[in-house]
Amino acid sequence: MSSPAKVFYPSFQLNICGELHAPAAGAPDRKGAAVVVSHPMTGVKEQTSTDYAKALAQAGFYALTFDAGYQGESTGEPRGLEDPHQRVEDIKAAVSYLTTLKGKVDASRIGLLGICASGGYASYAAQSDSRIRALATVSAACVGRMTRNGGVHEHLKENAQAIAGALQFAGQWRTNVADGAPSEAPAMFSTTEVPDDADQFFKDAAAYYGTSRGQHERSTQKVPPVSYDLMVAYDSFNLQHIISPRPLLMIAGSEAQTLHYSRTAVETAKEPKELFIVQGKNHFDIYDDLNESGPKLVDFFGKNLQ
């Protein structure tokens, strides 16, 4: 396959850096169908997004990966900021960019794939942008619920203490910046020194981000605390039902601590919808093991972007 073309497009006041993967030579003719692929929280486009984009391009689709605003090669300060509404705008701006590719991309055949936190952002974007004709997610999660509940696990519920702690953390950061004494953003988790008693989710994360599987110099896991007061009142899936009648596919591993996000989001969605569970895999396993998720996505977008 040929190398992807580096592209840039605006999103609010930011400049987003993306890579456009063209359909592989000899691939099926998808009549200009294209898929936006949005990366996980703390990730960059060169990681799992590129793995999925290559699989889609090999199957005949245009696939656009990009670095979210404040992250990777895109502009924005503070670096690493996780702003749900900017993230959603980045996705919509990616769709807008694809619509400008006259003669290549058919604007009526644009789909969206969101991975991890972007499974949540992609859901929110699809709820309010009818140009997105089909939505798929992989290991979807909601950063708002994660913040309010104090973690990703299903048994955790909205927790006043978790909310207060997140807001205090963010407020102190804002005060420090106002006083002219900002400090370096802390890492959300370590990829090198993982304690034995660490949460299994973060052990699994380190096994991906801290090894050759997903390691990348621009993926630092550093998240400015001000991100948490932006995330605390956000919810990805409250209006999942208004995606219908456009099709929805949510893919998750049977051993993923985040499976419950996809399960409940599909339950509240309307038809056509599907929850596809990859047996024996955790949240991060299907970032780079596409044996089942890859063909499923090709089939899904092939049927629904005709």
Image: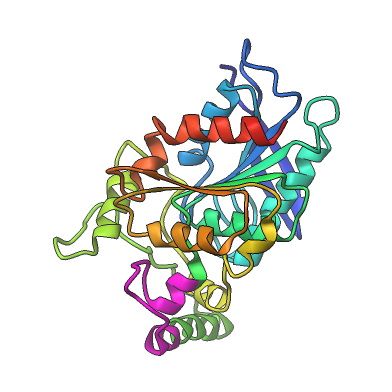
| Above or below for 194 versus 215 | below
Q: Residue at x 85, y 30 (%)?
A: 102
Q: Which residue appears farthest toward the top when viewing the image?
A: 26
| Residue 301: percent from left, percent from top | 62, 35
Name the side, left or right, on which 284 lies relative to 89.
Answer: left
Screen quadrant of the N terminus? top right
Looking at this view, is 286 or 182 the one in front? 286
Where does residue 30 sit, x and y in percent of width and height? 70, 23
* Left or right: 56, with 211 as reference point: right
Name the side, left or right, on which 104 lies relative to 246.
right
Q: Residue at 72%, 47% (x, y): give it.
A: 132
Looking at the picture, tell me which residue is in the foreground, 204 or 243.
Answer: 243
In this rendering, the answer to whether 68 lies above or below 184 is above
Give the vertical position of 235 relative to 263 (above or below). below
Name the side, left or right, on which 76 lies relative to 205: right
The structure residue drawn at horizontal position 75% and vertical position 24%, both measured from the top left corner, is: 31
Q: Position of residue 163 (x, y in %)?
A: 44, 84
The number of numbered badges drawn on the structure is 0
Q: Is residue 148 magenta?
A: yes
Residue furthest to the front in view is 271
Q: Is residue 99 magenta?
A: no
Let me know if residue 86 appears in the view.
Answer: no
- Which segment is the magenta one? 145-165
Based on the displayed image, in which of its 4 quarters is residue 259 positioned? bottom left
Image height of 256 relative to 35, above or below: below
Observer able to see residue 203: yes
Position in image of residue 284 (x %, y %): 35, 47
Q: Quadrant of residue 293?
A: top left
Quarter of the C terminus within the rendering:
top right
Residue placed at 75% from the left, 55% from the top?
129
